[in-house]
Amino acid sequence: MSSPAGLPAWLLPVHEAARTIEGRDLTRFLPPDSADVRRGAVLMLWSEGEQGAELLLTERAHDMRSHPGQVSFPGGSLDPGESVVEAALREAEEEVGVDPASVEVFGLLPELFLPPSNFAVTPVLGWWREQHRVEVVSAQEVHAIHHAPISELVDPTHRVTVRHPSGYTSPGFLIGADKDVILWGFTGGIISRLLDYLGWAEPWDEGKVQDLPDYMFAGDSVTQRNARAGLLDISDEERRAR
């Protein structure tokens, strides 16, 4: 893994955290010792924008069969023979046109588990060394791209507890220009716990509850809604089937 020599000073704590953090610091679900586990990777891409440090996020198309409107890091399943780094960079390029050569990979977070879909996912940490314009490559898959400033993610006014129809709740964030896009589930949990681990989080009102909008359940039965309470947000079966 690359040296932190070229990283901005504000990103060095993240590099250090990658060396010390454990899976249980990020989630209570860790991959089982099973050959049946599906493996995937997501790219946690850090960059600098007008408001300073930020993360690149994607919002899935609202009419997709699985997880419509879900906000996530670019990512998906590993292709045969791929490493997690190769998969994360490939998915970011395929989804929103990130040039892999523009990214400096500086660490990995522990492999995490998504029980509803039997996915073991590795978050790959990248510094967007040569930031460039990105755009939705396929409107059938991606509804929007979000450059989420860390200053807004730690702002208590943008933090909420998100409630799924099943009753499941998790920490969430209100993002986007109008703060009307909900970031929660797997990605929201990783961000929330990582901010806590880094000591960057600020106290917020966990009693402020936000229900998920109806468009995030288009075509779902009650059973499916309950099964998706964990919300895998790197599912890419639809794109691969096309």
Image (spheres, grey):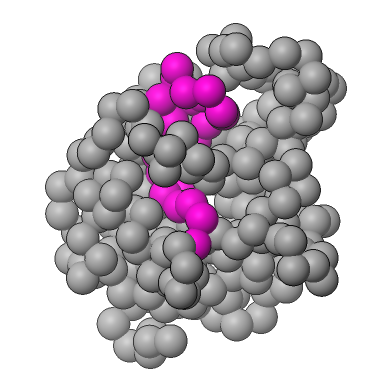
**Percent x, y of residue 27:** 75, 56
Residue drawn at (66%, 80%) of the image: 20
**Percent x, y of residue 7:** 33, 77
Q: Depth check: 219 or 232 in front?
A: 219
Q: Is residue 184 toward the left or the right of residue 151 in the image?
A: right
Picture quarter with the N terminus = bottom left
**Percent x, y of residue 131:** 19, 59
Is residue 207 depicted above or below 146 in this figure? above
Q: Which residues are magenta?
A: 57-78
Picture quarter with the C terminus = top left
Residue drawn at (22%, 49%) of the image: 97
**Percent x, y of residue 114:** 71, 50
Residue drawn at (64%, 58%) of the image: 38
Residue drawn at (45%, 52%) of the image: 75
Q: Is residue 135 toward the left or the right of residue 46 in the image?
A: left
Residue 114 in sight: yes
Is residue 188 depicted above or below 167 in this figure? below
Q: Depth check: 38 or 186 in front?
A: 38
- Magenta segment: does it hold 59? yes
| Rendering quarter of residue 62 | top left
Residue 193 in sight: no
Q: Is residue 112 toward the left or the right of residue 89 in the image?
A: right
